[in-house]
Amino acid sequence: MKRYIALLRGINISGKNKIPMPELKAYLTELGFIDVHTYLNSGNVAFSVDESNENTLSNTIKDMIQKRFGLDIPVFVILQEKLEDLLSKAPDWWGTSNRDVYDNLIFVMSPATAEIIAEKIGEPTKELEQICICDNTIFWSFDRKKYAKANWWKKTASTGIGELITIRTVNTLKKIVVM
């Protein structure tokens, strides 16, 4: 058995794309997933399953959500140990205790690449935000007080890339990597 993390994009936001976590957990269990746990109401799921691959699991979960909830939701799946390894590669400036900075990790969904996403968004705003591409993800930090002036803050939702990415905060990632 291998442990995986599934990140569902854009669910349970302002009453849109509603997926109750207990129902999601039950449907994943019906699919044969074991030891299913959810975190928060925003689509963070950990589960174990006999060996598979991330793309197959992503499609299986996406199809189940379409069938059970009638929603077309992008799903990103990563092996838990890959996520742990990725977090160990974080740049020194990411995930610190500095409360003035907000740290996120942008997961890029296949077939898109982190380089393409970074190119579409453009350069980070100097002195307000910084990025680091690593293993087809993007570590991204920005000034909490001046976020509205940050290029990446404005463009992650408005450049037509929304379906290609899902974003999680450092605090969420620290919780889900050990679920």
Image (cartoon, rainbow, N blue to C red):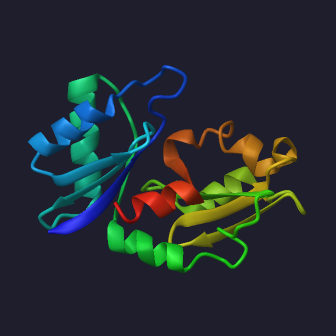
Q: Is residue 30 above or below residue 107?
A: above
Q: Is residue 50 left or right of residue 100?
A: left
The answer to which of 79 and 21 lies nearer the viewer is 21
Instruction: Locate residue 27 relative to residue 179 in the image: left or right.
Output: left
Q: How many marks?
A: 0
Residue at 72% across, 51% down:
121
In the rendered structure, the answer to whether residue 16 lies left or right of residue 62 reads right
Q: Position of residue 89 (x, y in %)?
A: 55, 80
Q: Residue furthest top?
A: 15
Q: Observer-nearest residue: 142 or 54?
A: 142
- The image position of residue 134, as x and y in percent, is 57, 73
As displayed, is residue 60 above or below residue 140?
above
Quadrant that contains the C terminus = bottom left
Q: Is residue 106 visible?
A: no
Residue depicted at x 43% and y 36%? 41
Q: Residue at x 24, y 31 (%)?
A: 23
Q: In the image, residue 73 lies at what x, y percent? A: 38, 35
Observer able to see residue 112 = yes
- In which quadrant will I find the N terminus? bottom left
Point 65% across, 68% down: residue = 95
Q: Nearer the viewer, residue 148 or 35?
A: 35
92 vs 98, nearest the viewer? 98
Residue 79 place in picture, x, y as percent: 32, 67
